[in-house]
Image: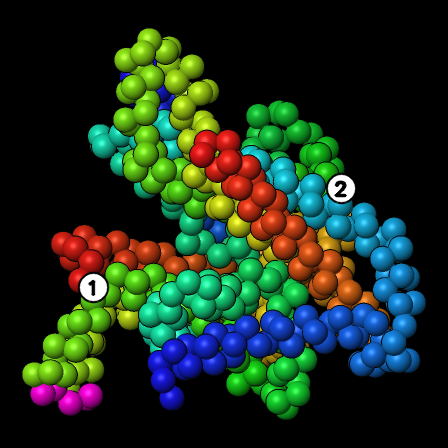
């Protein structure tokens, strides 16, 4: 629209600052030493906090712990999400709505409420304060999101392809390996990334279920910020940003490469 | 097991932790189970729900959620309308707008602490141009009673999502109706007011409600930027749940129920608005 021309030229620089400034500031803080007000630029630079990451210090080990948790959550959420999403997508009427509502529950409840509720179940299982307990905790909202995602994937899926393969003599394993998996390669990758990201950014659930003993990256960033150790907090915050940004990039790349959704 | 039964069992399994949690919260709230339980009694429920701290915390969280959602919605609508075309400038605008989308809320909170704190970068810029004398002269934007920093951080984090939704509403439903409006002689402002805006807010409403629910219950950014008085509802819940006094834990369950009621009320409000709109438009 021509009338929005001026508005666009005002908005563009504002959007650029909004997108770049917070990350730029975090980057500067992460390499600064003795950077006090009113200085606009750090007087000296240091790579201390980044070396801590590389050498497997507190931030480095938290990064790996978060990575393990997020990969496990993503993998398990995909297994649950494919099975449930596929079964629910084949339902009709109220059954389908009720199934979707059940999957939506863990997504809609505020994380702090979910954490308090989940801790009861996790403690009952004897997993409070453990990696497995936190993994189970992350899995609940992640599986909810991924199930909803696969419900929509399977809504547009042509199940007759599988029937045709079975008619032509394919075994269950062949059907899975040669028909279903190739068709679902992209949704599976996206579902995994969705589950990965739900776990990656979790703080409330990890704090409540892990009781502060499972030291993930969000937990360390939170602790560093509270302790006023801005350099380490900024480094951790930037590390937290890397997988989500990479994920969006990968998904955009995949969308660009595939002409049409394959299912 | 048939696929249908597997689906049902699985969905139930997904919902079970939430249902167990809510069921436990109700029973603990009425002192049936949990530390210090005395058997069915509404005393705790009445005591917690008559605490001024609970209502001021809830009110504060709702105010912050409303203002941040409103700010994010206005920004998203402006961005969606300004960059709705297919030219290079539109693509750049849209790409810049969605950049904050993948950034975790905790990172947004960390950025806000470093940017908006009294010796943060904004204060330093103010000092450099002579607007602010020193860190003490900078008006508090974080841990402040008004919640300016938290509102700004949440709005910054949520507007890209709303802009994305607004953009897709315009792309799929926009042009035909607007062109008809122009053909019938309506000016640009009239077309925006009578066609674009109603179409946008109706299309964006589910996303706006989701953002509101999220903002009212979010923990990460709130824990970093909110004041200690009043205590926002998610912080109050966490505080009671981790209190050294075990009997306070049941108070947290009541606060969880308050949070769930807020979410359900927002969803019910959305359904009511949708039903009303559908009745009006047939």
Q: Chain of mark 2?
A: B
Q: Nearer the viewer, residue B145 or A108?
A: A108
Q: CA distance from mark 2 to mark 1?
A: 51 Å
Tell me what residue is drawn at x 36 percent, y 84 percent: B2
Marks 2 and 1: same chain? no
Residue A55 in view of the camera: no
Write down the residue under mark 1.
Answer: A263
Judge whether residue A171 is colored magenta.
Answer: yes
Q: Quadrant of residue A181?
A: bottom left
Image quadrant of residue B121?
top right
Q: Secondary structure at mark 2?
A: loop
Is residue B112 rendered to the left or right of residue A56?
right
Horizontal side, residue A47 vs residue A204: left or right = left
Horizontal placement of B83 versus B7: left or right?
left
Extent of the magenta region: A169-173
Q: Residue B257 in the image: x percent, y percent?
A: 72, 63
- The residue located at (52%, 41%) in the rendering is B274
Q: Residue at x 63, y 90 (%)?
A: A126
Q: Quadrant of the N terminus of chain A?
A: top left
Residue at x 47%, y 81% (from the top left corner): B9
Q: Quadrant of the C terminus of chain A?
A: bottom left
Image location of residue B88, percent across then percent down: 22, 32
SS state under label 1: loop
Q: Which residue is mark 2?
A: B145
Q: Residue furthest left?
A: A168
Mark 2 or 1, closer to the camera? 1
The majority secondary structure of the magenta stretch comes to loop
């Amino acid at each position: 629209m021509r009338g929005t021309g001026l508005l666009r030229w005002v908005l563009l620089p504002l959007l650029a600052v909004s997108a770049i400034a917070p990350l730029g500031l975090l980057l500067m803080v992460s390499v600064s030493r003795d950077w006090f007000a009113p200085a606009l630029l750090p007087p000296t630079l240091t790579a201390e906090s980044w070396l801590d990451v590389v050498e497997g210090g507190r931030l480095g080990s938290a990064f790996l712990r978060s990575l393990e948790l997020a990969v496990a959550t993503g993998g398990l959420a995909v297994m649950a999400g494919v099975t449930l999403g596929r079964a629910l997508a084949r339902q009709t009427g109220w059954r389908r709505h009720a199934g979707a509502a059940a999957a939506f529950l863990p997504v809609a409840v505020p994380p702090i409420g979910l954490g308090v509720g989940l801790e009861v179940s996790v403690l009952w299982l004897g997993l409070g304060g453990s990696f497995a307990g936190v993994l189970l905790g992350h899995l609940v909202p992640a599986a909810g999101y991924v199930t909803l995602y696969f419900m929509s994937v399977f809504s547009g899926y042509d199940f007759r392809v599988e029937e045709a393969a079975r008619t032509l003599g394919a075994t269950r394993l062949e059907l899975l390996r040669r028909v279903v998996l190739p068709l679902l390669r992209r949704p599976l990758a996206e579902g995994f990334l969705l589950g990965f990201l739900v776990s990656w950014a979790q703080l409330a659930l990890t704090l409540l279920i892990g009781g502060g003993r499972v030291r993930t990256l969000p937990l360390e960033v939170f602790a560093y910020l509270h302790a006023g150790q801005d350099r380490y907090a900024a480094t951790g915050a930037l590390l937290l940003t890397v997988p989500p940004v990479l994920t969006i990039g990968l998904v955009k790349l995949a969308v660009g490469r595939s002409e049409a959704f394959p299912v | 097991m048939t696929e249908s039964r597997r689906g049902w069992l699985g969905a139930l399994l997904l919902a079970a932790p939430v249902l167990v949690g809510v069921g436990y919260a109700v029973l603990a709230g009425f002192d049936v189970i949990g530390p210090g339980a005395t058997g069915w009694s509404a005393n705790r429920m009445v005591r917690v729900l008559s605490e001024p701290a609970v209502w001021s915390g809830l009110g504060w969280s709702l105010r912050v959620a409303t203002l941040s959602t409103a700010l994010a919605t206005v920004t998203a609508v402006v961005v969606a309308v300004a960059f709705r075309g297919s030219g290079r400038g539109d693509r750049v605008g849209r790409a810049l707008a969605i950049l904050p989308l993948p950034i975790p809320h905790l990172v947004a909170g960390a950025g806000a602490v470093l940017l908006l704190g009294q010796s943060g970068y904004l204060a330093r810029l103010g000092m450099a141009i002579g607007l602010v004398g020193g860190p003490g002269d900078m008006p508090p934007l974080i841990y402040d009673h008004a919640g300016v920093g938290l509102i700004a951080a949440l709005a910054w984090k949520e507007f890209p999502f709303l802009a994305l939704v607004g953009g897709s509403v315009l792309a799929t439903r926009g042009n035909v109706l607007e062109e008809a409006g122009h053909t019938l002689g309506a000016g640009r402002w009239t077309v925006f007011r009578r066609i674009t805006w109603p179409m946008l807010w109706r299309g964006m409403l589910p996303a706006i409600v989701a953002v509101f629910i999220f903002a009212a219950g979010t923990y990460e950014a709130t824990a970093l930027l909110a004041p200690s008085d009043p205590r926002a509802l998610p912080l109050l819940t966490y505080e009671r749940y981790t209190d050294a006094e075990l009997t306070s834990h049941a108070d947290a369950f009541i606060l969880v129920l308050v949070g769930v009621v807020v979410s359900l009320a927002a969803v019910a409000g959305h359904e009511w608005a949708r039903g009303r709109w559908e009745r009006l438009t047939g």
